[in-house]
Image: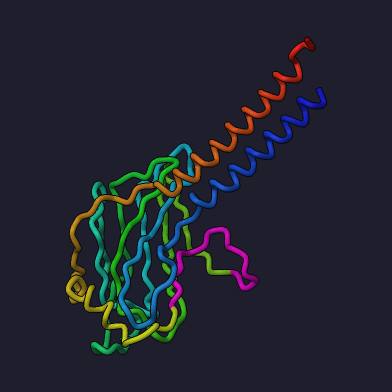
Amino acid sequence: MSFVRRAATVLAAATALTVGLAIPALAHVTIQPGTAEQGGFTKVAFRVPNERDDASTTKVEVSFPVDHPLAFVSVKPLPGWDVKVTQGKLPKPVKTEYGDLEEAVTKIVWSGGKINPGEFQEFEVSMGQLPKDTDALVFPTKQTYSKGEVVDWADAPKTDGTEAEHPAPTLKLVPASGGDGHGMASASASAAPAAAAPSVTPVAAATSASDGTARLLGGAGLVVGVIGVVIGALGLRRRPAA
């Protein structure tokens, strides 16, 4: 019986390890990639995992900064989802190399689609020109579930370096590696020149949940392997002596 108890303990530990590896791949709304160069243009994806096992995510609302507004914002159509881009007047005009910016995108809302339990979706946005006078842009995000629950991903980073309970997606900005940032701008300018009416890029297939699925399958394989070892050991122990 002591052997059985030890085997159960090992199995429980392996299961806990598997869950610990799988959860980070599915937790929190994030922005991917998490870093971009100051003064340039970039394409990002707001990665939204479904963290409930009894409800689907049906709406995602991303708020854009008004203290460091972005003059050019365009969205990539996502099959099955409706998108609404809201533009508003800024608290005060912001000087840019294109002139004074008085209005900018303040919010983007995706709705009408569904992210099922155990899945995630990525919502892609092209934006710029990224500011040069800050090292981060914060995008508070609200995630609505089919049962009416709304999770507000808006917590600021903690000063002690630990993660907040509901951290807001944050894009870190680093100094440009070379040039003046217009190399990236030229690739996006054709899609972004109308701040008043954001343009749309061609449709592409939705990003699959391959990375999260692979992590889960790997963890499941670990558990199955441990179970096999335990069962084999029990069988050998119970086999009668010749």
Q: Quadrant of residue 177?
A: bottom left
Front residue of 1/202: it is 1
Q: Residue furthest right?
A: 2
Q: Please name the residue shown 32% across and 87% down the image.
A: 179
Q: Does the segment drawn in magenta span residue 151? A: no
Of residues 203 and 51, the one drawn nearer to the viewer in this rendering: 203
Q: Is residue 84 above or below residue 111?
A: below
Looking at the image, is 66 positioned above or below residue 155?
A: below
Q: Position of residue 94 (x, y in %)?
A: 32, 86
* Magenta stretch, residue numbers: 158-173
x 28%, y 68%: residue: 126
* Image position, residue 110 (x, y; %): 30, 55
Quadrant containing the C terminus in the rendered view: top right
The percent position of residue 214, horizontal first and vertical second, equals 46, 44
* Residue located at (19% from left, 63% from top): 200
Report which quarter residue 236 is drawn in: top right
- Residue 140 is at least partly visible in this image: yes
Whether residue 195 is visible to the viewer of this picture, yes or no, is: no
Measuring 77% from the left and 28% from the top, which residue is drawn there? 5
| Residue 165 part of the magenta-drawn span | yes
Name the dominant secondary structure of the magenta segment: loop
Q: Is residue 61 left or right of residue 161?
A: left
Q: Quadrant of residue 17?
A: top right
Q: Quadrant of the N terminus?
A: top right
